[in-house]
Image (cartoon, rainbow, N blue to C red):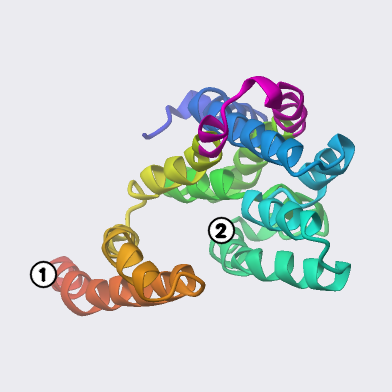
């Protein structure tokens, strides 16, 4: 949704608007996901402060779940590090696609610290709204948005751990899945059709690939659905738009 000029009149107002964008459904969804993560950690007999440290340093729910699963099975730290790194490899693409849209004057060393705040929720919302925001306002908007999202992870994790005994395991799993579901629904609002096509194709291919090979189904589904969505967009959808624009 486009913002009014007053909401983005300065870098400070853009920062506040980013915080307002996060407050509400995005922060609540992320908080509930971290509550589910804390409850999963309790079920795996993890120390609450280890879980809290993971929320502050990893800041990626899939990687955190992999971490506690492997820790509970006694996996060596080298294997855990490699597995968490692999699940977080998507951040390379996320950083490139998002930070390339920032103003050149914001390409400063402090971005190395700001990039740690990047998570799926903040990335999806920024990708959705950046085209309505002037380039010089995008960095403070992202910082306000990502800061609020990051601040809810620690209390959510600890609350989930301490409430785990009174929460049914099915509810715990549902809370963990709320965050990726919210991301999918948000990402359908991003302008390129390739994203929407990839999500639809992934919903179709996911169950099929899982039936053939559960271990590699997620990777295969993402690779095939994403590639097909991009190809269809480039081959059939984007060309007519370019041709009509040229006229």
Tell me the number on the disc at residue 69: none
Q: Could one spot residue 168 in this view of the protein?
A: yes
Report if the CB atoms under discs 2 and 1 are less than 8 Å apart: no
Which residue is at the front of the view, 34 or 151? Answer: 34
Q: Residues within 10 Å of mark 1 (few under 14, many from 20)?
A: few
Secondary structure mostly seen in magenta is: helix
Q: Residues within 10 Å of mark 2 (few under 14, many from 20)?
A: some
Q: Could one spot residue 10 in this view of the protein?
A: no
Residues in magenta?
A: 154-173
Mark 2 or mark 1, earlier in chain:
2
Q: Secondary structure at mark 2?
A: helix
Image quarter in which the C terminus is found: bottom left
Q: CA distance from mark 2 to mark 1?
A: 31 Å
**Which mark's residue is nearer the viewer, 2 or 1?**
2
Q: Secondary structure at mark 1?
A: loop
Q: Give the residue at x 29% y 70%.
A: 229
- Residue 168 lies, in percent from the top left, at 56, 27
Q: Give the residue at x 56% y 40%.
A: 176
Tell me the number on the disc at residue 98: 2
Above/below status of 48 relative to 239: above
- Residue 151 lies, in percent from the top left, at 73, 32
Q: Give the residue at x 57% y 34%.
A: 169
Which residue is at the front of the view, 238 or 42? Answer: 42
Tell me the number on the disc at residue 247: 1
Q: Quadrant of residue 198?
A: bottom left
- Residue 202 lies, in percent from the top left, at 33, 63
Q: Give the residue at x 87% y 43%.
A: 50
């Amino acid at each position: 949704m486009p913002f009014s000029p007053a909401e983005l009149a300065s870098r400070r107002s853009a920062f506040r608007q980013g915080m307002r964008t996060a407050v509400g459904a995005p922060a609540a969804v992320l908080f509930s996901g971290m509550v589910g993560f804390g409850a999963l950690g309790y079920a795996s007999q993890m120390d609450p402060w280890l879980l809290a440290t993971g929320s502050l340093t990893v800041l990626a729910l899939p990687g955190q779940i992999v971490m506690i699963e492997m820790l509970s099975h006694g996996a060596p730290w080298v294997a855990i590090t490699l597995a968490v790194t692999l699940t977080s490899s998507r951040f390379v693409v996320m950083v490139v696609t998002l930070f390339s849209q920032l103003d050149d004057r914001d390409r400063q060393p402090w971005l190395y610290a700001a990039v740690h705040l990047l998570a799926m929720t903040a990335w999806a919302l920024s990708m959705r709204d950046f085209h309505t925001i002037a380039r010089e306002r995008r960095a403070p908007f992202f910082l306000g948005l990502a800061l609020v999202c990051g601040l809810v992870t620690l209390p959510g994790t600890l609350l989930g751990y301490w409430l785990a005994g009174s929460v049914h395991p099915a509810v715990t799993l549902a809370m963990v899945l709320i965050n990726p579901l919210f991301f999918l629904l948000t990402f359908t609002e991003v302008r390129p059709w390739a994203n929407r096509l990839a999500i639809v194709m992934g919903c179709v291919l996911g169950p099929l690939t899982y039936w053939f090979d559960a271990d590699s189904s997620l990777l295969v589904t993402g690779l095939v659905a994403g590639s097909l969505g991009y190809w269809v967009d480039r081959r059939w959808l984007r060309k007519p738009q370019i041709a009509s624009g040229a006229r």
